[in-house]
Structures are given as structure tokens and as C-alpha cells.
Amino acid sequence: MRITAVEPILLRGSEAYASPADGAEATDNGDWQLLVRVATDEGLEAWADAETLAPAAVAIIAGQGMGTLGFHTLSNILIGEDPLDIERLWDKLYVGSAYYGRRGIAMQCISAIDNALWSIRAQATGLSIAQLLGGRRRDTVMAYASTLFRSTPEGMAEAAQGYIDKGFQAVKFGWGVFGEDPGRDRELVAAARDTLGPDRHLLVDPGWYPAGWTKPGPMRSRREAIALCEWLGDYNVGWVEDFIHPERFDEYAEIRAISPVPIAAGEQLATVWEFERFIEGGCVDIVQPDLSRCGGLTVARRIAQMAERANIDLVPHSWLTHLLTGYSLQLIASLPRAPFVEFNVSQSALTRGIARAGFALDAEGMIAIPDGPDGGVAVDLDFIAAHRVSL
């Protein structure tokens, strides 16, 4: 079997990130989305999504490369290769794009391709990706509703009640207006905790950009980061996520050592080598590789081994389409310990329409993990055709 196509598919929508004041649902990226389709000469094909600068990613995958090794486009590297030889192909993609890649958009494209190759291997063998990753250890996992902070305590309470009504036992609020006003930050968290009650899980992602995402401001100082962890502890927060500059591993380790709240991070990192330094440096209690950014399932499998050796939890960051959720669930099924799956309740019309999945909560807020080569997710070809654009 040989790879015959590595196709970047650029989709255009009409929505932007938005976080309302009331309990209405927030919206994730709804303006651009990149998909990757990998096809073979035996009729097998697979799809994956990537959270990246989508228009630029098209050129990296299928644009005009150069003759020198390290400047090749990703499709040229893969055409004619055996899609089942995933680990060797990962190395070939990394070296072939090394002079313009190694991180960022190139690695995000490699991640999507790698996930698609694992899907092809699953289809070719008739096994689930979880089985290929080492075996299926669980059939269900608790889902947490992943959304943005609302801008008022009343909106937070309304939103939290809405997730309770949908059956969620865990909710993560992130970004939005958080970081602009410390007093309001505490009021928003307090409203969420009061509504969720003492027995449901409340997770917080303050964001690491200066003063949230709405206006410019300084990065948090170390003292401010420590103070943030201390007061979040008053509200029995399950973790505080990705709130330190991602290059400051020493700061993560320092604050983790004294924080009353568990520290979660990793969505900004990529490659085995970066995660190795992060985990061995004692930076987190919960490591969060994003399969659309870290290097894909090939890298995530090795991150899981590191996490197990360090005796920390792994919860994939998966705030995108159902494709990413599906791949994340397969990784979760293979883990020795798995507290949560991130469930993006804030999908835009664009990210929501790309793929269909039968993910549903049971009475305990758990999601069944599909078992089978397709991972329980199917792309909507008509939707994709209707939103596809060319540069």
C-alpha cells in the first residue's frame, strides 16, 4: 500500500471567537479551519484537523518546496511511501521540514498527518487506534465541558447551570475576560463554584497572554501567578491550566512546588524532546499534549510513557472538532489512568459541522469511547464541500 495524496483542505466560516456576558454559549474559531486528507492506492483514506494558521499551512503541505533537504513540502515527502510505516515517516517529515519547521505551523501540519496515518493503520488492521497504541484499558471517561469565561457573575451562574442540566459533572472555564480585573476574576470563579456545588469538578484556564485576550497588558509576574493559585485554592479548583509563559519551565516548576492547586499545561509544547524537559523538570501535575500540535499520536504515545514514569496524569487538550476529540479518546482509552476528556461545547458553526459523532453523556457524566477502526467519527463531505475555499 502506498500514499497517493496528502491534501490540505481549507475551510472558511463567518464567526470569530466570542464570549458573551450572559449564559449563552461561547464560540471557538469560526473563521478558518484546516483539514488534512491522506489517501492510499488501496482506497483507504483518513482525515484530521489542525489548529493552526490555516492559510499558511496549505503551502507547507502542498505548496512549492525547494530541492535542499529540510525545505521540502510535506506532501512531497510522503507521496509513494507506505502509510503503515508511521514512526519512520514521522522522522522523515521532521528532517524534511527541519529548516522551516521543528515547531509551529510545520509541526501542527505533521501532527494532523500523523493522526491520519494512525487512522489508516487502524483501518488496514481492523483494530482500534487504542489497541494499536498498546491496548484498550477503559470503555468510558468523564467529559468536562470546555468553554470560555462569561463577563459577569450572573452569566457564569447561568452557563454553569446549563452544563449541569446537560449532565456534565465537570466544567472548565477559560480565557474570555479573565485577567483584566482580579476582583472580577474572583467573582466569576465564585459564581461558577456556587452553582456547580461542592461535588462537581471546576477547572480554570486563566490564559497566559497579557491581561487575557481582549486588550494589551503585562504578563503575570511570578508573585501574581502564585497569588492566583492561592486564591483559586479557596474554591476547590481541580487544576489551574496553562497560565504561565510556555517558555518558562523554571517558573512552572517553582510554582507547582508551592501551589495548593494542581498545575496543568502542555498544549503549547511540541515534540518528544520538549515534553521530556517539561515533565522531567517537575513542571506539572497534569500534562496536556494537544494531538493537533504536539506531533500527533506518535509523539503522544511517548509522552504517555513519560507521564506514567513521572506518576502524573495525562489529559489531552482537545478544543477543536470531533475529529480531534475522537483521536484524543483513543489515546485516553490506552492510558493506565485517565481522569477526563476535554469536550468542546463552544464549537462554532464551522468546527461543529465538519464531523459527526455519537458522543453522549451518561447519567454520571461519562462518555463511551468508541471501539473500532473508525473511532466513531465521520466527516461530513457535503459540509466540507460547501465551506471549502482556495487561496
Image (spheres, rainbow, N blue to C red):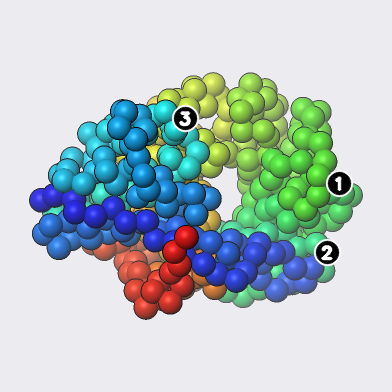
* Of 368 and 117, the residue lying toward us: 117
**Contact between labelled residues 3 and 2, with CB atoms less than 8 Å apart:** no
Residue 169 appears anywhere in the view: no
* Relative horizontal placement of residue 271, taking residue 330 as reference (left or right): right
Q: Closer to the N terminus: mark 2 or mark 1?
A: 2
Near mark 3 (Cα within 10 A), the count class, few <14, some 14-19 or many ≥20, is many
Residue ID at (61%, 33%): 246
* Relative horizontal placement of residue 296, taking residue 201 as reference (left or right): left
- The amino acid marked with disc number 2 is Thr
Residue ID at (66%, 71%): 25
- The amino acid marked with disc number 1 is Pro
The image shows residue 359 at horizontal and vertical percentages of: 42, 69
Residue position for label 2: 152
* Relative horizontal placement of residue 298, taking residue 143 as reference (left or right): left
Q: Is residue 45 above or below residue 166?
A: above
**Contact between labelled residues 1 and 3, with CB atoms less than 8 Å apart:** no
How far is mark 3 from mark 1, CA to CA?
A: 31 Å
How far is mark 2 from mark 3, CA to CA?
A: 36 Å
* Relative horizontal placement of residue 255, taking residue 146 as reference (left or right): right
Residue position for label 1: 182
Residue position for label 3: 275
Q: Closer to the N terminus: mark 3 or mark 1?
A: 1
Residue ID at (53%, 56%): 319
Residue 206 appears anywhere in the view: yes
* Of 104 and 196, the residue lying toward us: 104
- The amino acid marked with disc number 3 is Phe
Q: Is residue 101 above or below residue 37?
A: above
Residue ID at (55%, 59%): 144
